[in-house]
Image (cartoon, coloured by chain):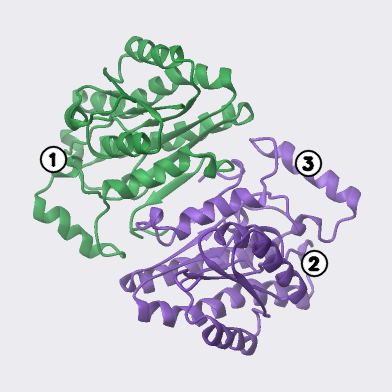
Chain colours: A purple, B green
């Protein structure tokens, strides 16, 4: 384990974050961070059962004190963060007139401020090491428009913009920052706010609208993540890559 | 053993990709107007066809040989292209036609030659090459820019047409890279000096493009289709 690089993954307790943790644990020590400590611990158990090494850390990415405390624990336990995937996110549907201030604030705080705070926490180590790779979780909806998702679209666009700016700022330090822009993936986020029947209907409807005719699996996103985190993409920074079944082409 | 087909395999990115795919244990069918540096590659799994991508009959014949091996054709990458510069008003009709016929029509014809076998097997990954110049433009490069913009549209349409049949089609858009192509229009020192204006501090290497193409050809990109992967060191983020 001493020779393994450390990767910090937020939102590692479910969906794409968990699939990413399992995939990256093939070669790295995974720090599985999640608001839900139990689900992060469950991800760690899955990794350990697979022969990998990982540790769970609870974090509220929208809270600077919590992110700072997470960083402190990582420093104490394993040292520095070599690579990071910031995947913590939520999805709340709602037409614009129904978006409450709380809904708006949570959307912005978890996605935009959370990504910002987490980048801010890990970049000093990477600058000191003169290397590092970060992947932020954006969405097809950073670019393409859908109704009833104004807050989510605004948040995901902001993450993409943040990614591009940070990429330019830290390129001289040999640090690469890219974004993932998934399309419809079969994750718990698709189930949130939907009854089982509504979830099933949504899956069928989304699959039918996609060029490839099926939803993506979290593992298909983490395979792209693996490419973006590896030296295979050494000449890519500030980009958004879309595992989206052809939903958006631009 | 699965087969990969590469056009423009005699030099530059195509050559690098052919080598990489051989190292990944594919049988590689290399197509180009001349073997170029590929002549120095000795590998039983490499077969070279001397052909011009403007020649539909030659492409069909070469594709038939691949199908005849009975192995799955895992992918096709269309790297064959030319790049010649000229001020807009001085672009000769011949020059325009050469660019369009090799870079764009040649891509279409190569896909048309290989797609039937892919459709029959119900799978296949196609990787085309556009360029940063398609979106950003470049001085004295109208003909080249038009073809590379055309590749983006061609790829998306192909991706939509055949998505349900299990075919994926994507694009790699390199920035300026250390190949013979830019050396035809600029001096050696100027080429490397371009790295100073690129966020990651260097021009691209053929390997950078090769890695992106081999990723897109592989099953790791199973949910990626119709996309343009921009491998440009952070030049022109938009």
Are labels 1 and 3 on one chain? Answer: no
Crowding around mark 1 (Cα neighbors within 10 Å: few <14, some 14 to 19, many 20+) is: few
Q: Whole-Å distance between the Cαs marked 1 and 3?
A: 51 Å
**Residue, disc 3:** A205
Specify whether B113 is left or right of A138.
left
Residue B134 visible in image? no
Is disc 2 on the same chain as disc 3?
yes
* Residue found at x 56% / y 80%: A117
A33 lies above or below B124: below
C-alpha gap between disc 2 and disc 1: 58 Å
Given this view, does label 2 or label 1 mark the residue nearer the observer? 1
The residue that label 2 is drawn on is: A97
Which mark lies nearer to you, 3 or 2?
Answer: 3
Q: Nearer the viewer, residue A90 or A151?
A: A90
Position of residue B85 in the picture relative to residue A9 (left or right):
left
Q: Which residue is mark 1?
A: B184
Q: Residue at x 61, y 64 (%)?
A: A156
Q: Secondary structure at mark 1?
A: loop
The reply to whether the C-beta atoms of the residues labelled 2 and 1 are less than 8 Å apart is: no
Q: What SS does tag 2 mark?
A: helix
Q: Position of residue A230 (x, y in %)?
A: 43, 58
Q: Chain letter for mark 2, please.
A: A
- Spatial CA distance of label 3 from label 2 is 25 Å
């Amino acid at each position: 384990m001493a020779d393994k690089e450390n990767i910090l993954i937020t939102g590692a307790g479910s969906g794409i974050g968990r699939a990413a943790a399992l995939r990256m644990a093939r070669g790295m020590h995974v720090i599985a961070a999640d608001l839900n400590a139990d689900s992060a611990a469950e991800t760690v158990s899955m990794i350990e059962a697979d022969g990998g090494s990982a540790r769970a850390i609870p974090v509220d990415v929208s809270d600077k004190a919590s992110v700072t405390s997470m960083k402190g624990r990582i420093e104490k336990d394993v040292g520095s963060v070599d690579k990071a995937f910031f995947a913590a996110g939520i999805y709340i549907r709602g037409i614009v007139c129904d978006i409450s201030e709380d809904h708006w604030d949570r959307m912005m705080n978890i996605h935009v401020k959370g990504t910002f705070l987490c980048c801010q926490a890990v970049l000093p180590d990477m600058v000191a090491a003169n290397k590092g790779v970060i992947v932020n979780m954006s969405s097809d909806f950073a670019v393409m428009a859908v109704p009833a998702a104004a807050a989510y679209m605004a948040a995901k666009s902001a993450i993409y913009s943040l990614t591009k700016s940070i990429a330019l700022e830290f390129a001289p330090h040999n640090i690469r920052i890219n974004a993932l822009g998934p399309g419809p993936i079969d994750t718990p986020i698709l189930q949130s706010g939907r009854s089982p029947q509504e979830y099933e209907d949504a899956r069928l409807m989304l699959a039918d609208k996609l060029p490839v005719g099926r939803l993506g699996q979290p593992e298909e996103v983490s395979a792209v993540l693996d490419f973006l985190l590896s030296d295979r993409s050494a000449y890519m920074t500030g980009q958004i890559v879309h595992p989206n079944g052809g939903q958006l082409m631009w | 053993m699965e087969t990969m087909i590469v056009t423009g395999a005699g030099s530059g990115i195509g050559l690098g990709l052919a080598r990489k795919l051989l190292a990944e244990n594919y049988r590689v069918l290399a197509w180009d107007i001349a073997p170029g540096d590929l002549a120095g590659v000795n590998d039983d799994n490499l077969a070279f066809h001397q052909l011009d991508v403007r020649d539909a009959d030659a492409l069909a014949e070469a594709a038939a040989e691949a199908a005849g091996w009975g192995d799955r054709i895992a992918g096709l990458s269309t790297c064959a292209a030319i790049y010649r510069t000229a001020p807009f008003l001085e672009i000769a009709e011949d020059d325009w036609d050469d660019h369009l016929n090799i870079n764009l029509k040649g891509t279409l014809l190569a896909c048309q030659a290989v797609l039937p076998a892919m459709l029959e097997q119900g799978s296949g990954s196609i990787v085309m090459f556009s360029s940063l110049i398609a979106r950003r433009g470049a001085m004295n490069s109208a003909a080249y820019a038009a073809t590379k913009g055309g590749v983006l549209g061609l790829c998306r349409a192909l991706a939509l047409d055949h998505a349900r049949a299990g075919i994926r089609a994507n694009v790699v858009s390199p920035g300026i890279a250390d190949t013979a192509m830019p050396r035809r229009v600029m001096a050696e020192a100027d080429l490397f000096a371009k790295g100073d204006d690129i966020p990651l501090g260097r021009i691209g290497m053929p390997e950078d493009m090769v890695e992106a193409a081999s990723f897109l050809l592989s099953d790791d990109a199973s949910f990626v289709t119709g996309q343009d992967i921009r491998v440009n060191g952070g030049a022109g983020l938009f």
